[in-house]
Image (tube, rainbow, N blue to C red):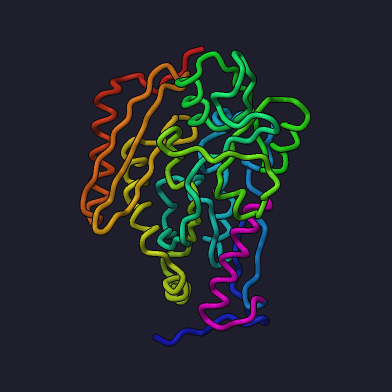
Amino acid sequence: MTIDLPTPDHPLNIGTRGSPLALAQAHETRRRLSEAFDLPEEAFRIVVIKVTGDAIQDRPLKEIGGKGLFTREIEEDLLSGKIDIAVHSMKDMPVEQPAGLLLDTYLPREDVRDAFISPDKDGIAALAQGAVVGTSSLRRKAQLLNRRPDLQVVEFRGNVQTRLRKLSEGVAECTFLAMAGLNRLAMDEVPKHAISPDDMLPAVAQGAIGIERRADDSRTATMLEAIHHGPTGQRLAAERAFLAELDGSCETPIAGLAELEGGTLRLRGEVLRPDGSQAIADDASAPIEDGPELGRAMARKLLEQAGPGFFDWHS
């Protein structure tokens, strides 16, 4: 199929949030497209879009809405034609896209692990009784309190740079970030220790970049096929099916990780009470093509074990 490729005079517009990490992900997408089609980078224009989740920094995410906080404005510009594709951190993405949009392209997944960040401690076990920990993630908060109910957890919003500044100001003794983000920003100087998924199962789709497009845009669909990473797509199909069946949002502590070995997909999933008082986990494998059904089945099993009211908040 012959397509009209973008040019510096008529570039393909790439929509993104404006944080340093979001921009790094947009630049990676531009570089991969440029190399795949032997085009100058000027044939792809990065368009920064302000989203609600970035504009409101003084309240927990659960008070201002779900994951759509980081995608709504970008998707509106995609539907209106202001941009041609949108680049997202997949762990921020709702499991359903607005009518007319498709999310079917993924770049090779980065390190899935969480990073323990502290200037003078080397892990959770090194924290003193009652230590103050900063995180905006309900999953990390619940996982921490499940293992260390003595810890105090305070809200820690903002991009990587903002959270590191709060740490230096003594707001908390430690915080957590995704290893993927630190790697993509080449922040080797950050005092970090990677946490094994065996000790802290990551968020669904952590470390993955997704590219969203209009369903009726065949030119863009053809271009994105050239940079899609199939194994990442297979892993996320299982993880996001698991999340969708759980009806997961920013208000529910859920973790999940799919890994491939030969023709087999291994899926680990975990749900937790928001206060960390209970965690229910599962670990199962299936042929890769059955990954989505494995995810749905695991979610149903965990929901049955959890019972009604498991995710309810208690003050």
Residue 129 vertical placement versus 18 (above, below): above
Q: Residue at x 60, y 55 (%)?
A: 184
Query: Residue 260 location in percent, x, y?
Result: 32, 54
Residue nearer the viewer, 260 or 90: 260
Magenta span: 17-41
Count of residue discs: 0
Q: Answer above or below: position of 73 versus 129.
A: below
Tell me where residue 246 appears, x and y as whole percent: 34, 35
Horizontal placement of 50 versus 225: left or right?
right
Residue 53 at x, y = what percent?
A: 62, 41
* Front-most of residues 192 and 38: 192
**Rendered image quadrant of residue 168:** top right
Residue 15 vs residue 302: left or right? right
Q: Is residue 156 left or right of residue 36?
A: right
Residue at the spot x=32%, y=48% of the render? 238
User: Which of 302/114 is in front?
Assistant: 114
> What residue lies at 55% left-to-right and 62% top-to-bottom?
80
- Confirm whether the magenta stretch covers residue 27: yes
Which residue is situated farthest in the bottom direction here?
2
Q: Is residue 304 left or right of residue 13?
A: left
Q: Main secondary structure of the magenta part?
A: helix
